[in-house]
Image: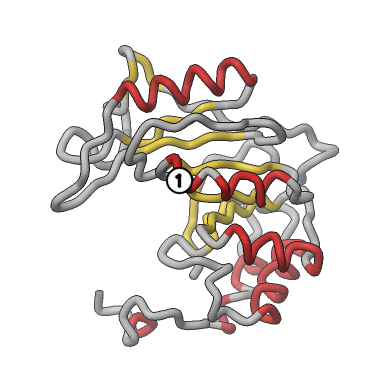
Amino acid sequence: MGNPRYTRGLRVTLHPDLVDLPLKWREPRTIFVNSMADLFHETVPVSFIQSVFATMQVANWHVFQILTKRAARLAEIAPSLPWPSNVWMGVSVERQDYTWRVDYLRGLRAAVRSLSCEPLLGPLQLDLREIHWVIVGGESGPGARPMDLAWAGTIRDQCHAANVPFFLKQLGGTRDKRGHDQALLEGQLWRKMPTLDETRCAAPQLQREVAIV
């Protein structure tokens, strides 16, 4: 992509010099950590993960959203990490056979525990106990597998029954790649997010997303 930080392609590469970057951003932001990687990948040292969490703990005027597919490693390392209220933790659940990841997430001390059902590749039946947010989206790009809107509708209904905010991010495929005002389900946009009061989070209702690594 012309960026010197991607000379190794998509192989796992650590950038320690960027870990403290959020401390320089004085305006509160919502920061999506590792948009093109997985912080809990098996090759990422625990010490590096701890340094990322230390920065998030200090930068309490931001909200940090983390997403992983390595739910088992997340649960293993979690006791050695601080869990300030500005760190929101999520796991990917794209098919029914990955719902086991939710069980690892459920026991964490994160203020917000979320599920990312993106790309949604089939119908899901979810146990939403102790889950605070569900995000759904289709697969985009060449050869994208289609998302049946009925799958998204079923998840929305489960969220409604469990009083969990439901966020339909995008439809995927050629219908819609980024959401905007086109990601409609039954003629409506579904963009609900968790709300935290000032006693639980230093920056409760931020909308801007920034990828930092």
- Residue at 68 percent across and 78 percent down: it is 46
Crowd around label 1: few <14 · some 14–19 · many ≥20 (10 Å): few
74 versus 104 height, above or below? below
Residue 11 in picture, x, y percent from top left: 38, 80
Q: Quadrant of the N terminus?
A: bottom left
Residue 35, picture quadrant: bottom left
Tell which of 39 and 41 is nearer to you: 41
Tell which of 153 and 65 is nearer to you: 153
**Mark 1 belongs to which amino acid?**
Asp
Left or right: where 117 falls relative to 173: right
The single residue placed furthest to the top in the displayed view is 187
88 versus 187 height, above or below? below
- Residue at 53 percent across and 43 percent down: it is 99
Left or right: where 147 falls relative to 153: left
Residue 135 in picture, x, y percent from top left: 48, 37
Residue 153, picture quadrant: top left
Tell which of 7 and 17 is nearer to you: 7
- Residue at 30 percent across and 24 percent down: it is 149
Residue 158 in picture, x, y percent from top left: 53, 21
37 versus 116 height, above or below? below
Tell which of 162 and 47 is nearer to you: 162
Tag 1 residue: 97
- Residue at 25 percent across and 41 percent down: it is 177
Residue 30 in picture, x, y percent from top left: 57, 49
